[in-house]
């Protein structure tokens, strides 16, 4: 993925906002992660970049970045949202047991997108594909393998 930070700085300035150290920390964490992160996860990882980062600041930053189209909600269940950088096509597996979110490669989707464009007249600029099911660990245990939401997943799983 191209570095979204220069585009984020331009979009923030154009909307009358600054790229503060807190906003930069949130963007850097999102840019480094290929799956969505909850606000709590962004807060925890962002503090490693910018120690004064506060959880309320993360929520406010996400709201602003979402409004400006710089991030998007990747999934939501009744209680939480995950966020990822906008602008890149994303393909996710979401475990309905433990809420683990894994990004996966998806070859062959270009033909489907071209077909949808031809049939509908839409010019598709990006997409988000999300498949929901049970991860192998939850299947093995018959329920959430880890009650902690969004436990780390191996890359490319």
Image (spheres, rainbow, N blue to C red):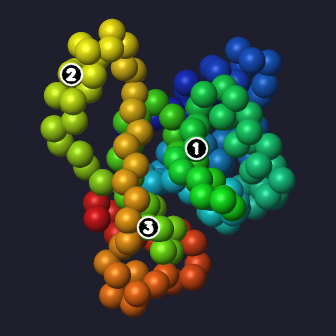
Q: Which mark is residue 95?
A: 3
Residue under circle 2? 115
Quadrant location, the C terminus: bottom left
Crowdedness near tag 1: few (<14), some (14–19) or many (≥20) residues, C-alpha within 10 Å: some
How much space separates mark 3 and mark 2, taking CA atoms?
29 Å
Q: Quadrant of residue 120?
A: top left
Q: Secondary structure at mark 2?
A: helix
Q: Which residue ends up furthest to the front in the rendered image? A: 119
* Vertical comparison of 42 with 122: above or below: below
How much space separates mark 1 and mark 2, taking CA atoms?
26 Å
125 vs 54, left or right, is left
Residue under circle 1? 73
Q: Quadrant of residue 127?
A: top left
Q: Nearer the viewer, residue 97 or 5?
A: 97
Q: Is residue 30 visible?
A: no
**Viewer-nearest of discs 3 and 1:** 3
Q: Are marks 3 and 2 in contact (CB under 8 Å)?
A: no
- Look at 37% across and 43% down and name the residue there: 129
Crowdedness near tag 2: few (<14), some (14–19) or many (≥20) residues, C-alpha within 10 Å: few
**Viewer-nearest of discs 1 and 2:** 2
How much space separates mark 3 and mark 1, taking CA atoms?
16 Å
């Amino acid at each position: 993925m191209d570095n979204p930070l220069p585009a984020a700085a331009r979009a923030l300035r154009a909307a009358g906002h600054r790229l503060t150290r807190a906003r930069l920390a949130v963007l850097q964490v999102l840019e480094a992660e290929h799956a969505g992160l909850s606000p709590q996860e962004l807060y925890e990882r962002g503090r490693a970049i910018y120690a004064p980062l506060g959880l309320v600041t993360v929520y406010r930053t996400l709201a602003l970045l979402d409004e400006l189209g710089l991030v998007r909600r990747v999934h939501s269940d009744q209680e939480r949202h995950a966020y990822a950088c906008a602008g890149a096509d994303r393909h996710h597996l979401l475990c309905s047991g433990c809420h683990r979110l894994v990004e996966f490669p998806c070859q062959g989707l270009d033909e489907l997108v071209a077909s949808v464009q031809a049939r509908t007249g839409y010019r598709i600029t990006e997409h988000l594909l999300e498949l929901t099911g049970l991860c192998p660990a939850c299947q093995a245990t018959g329920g959430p393998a880890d009650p902690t939401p969004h436990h780390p997943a191996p890359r490319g799983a």
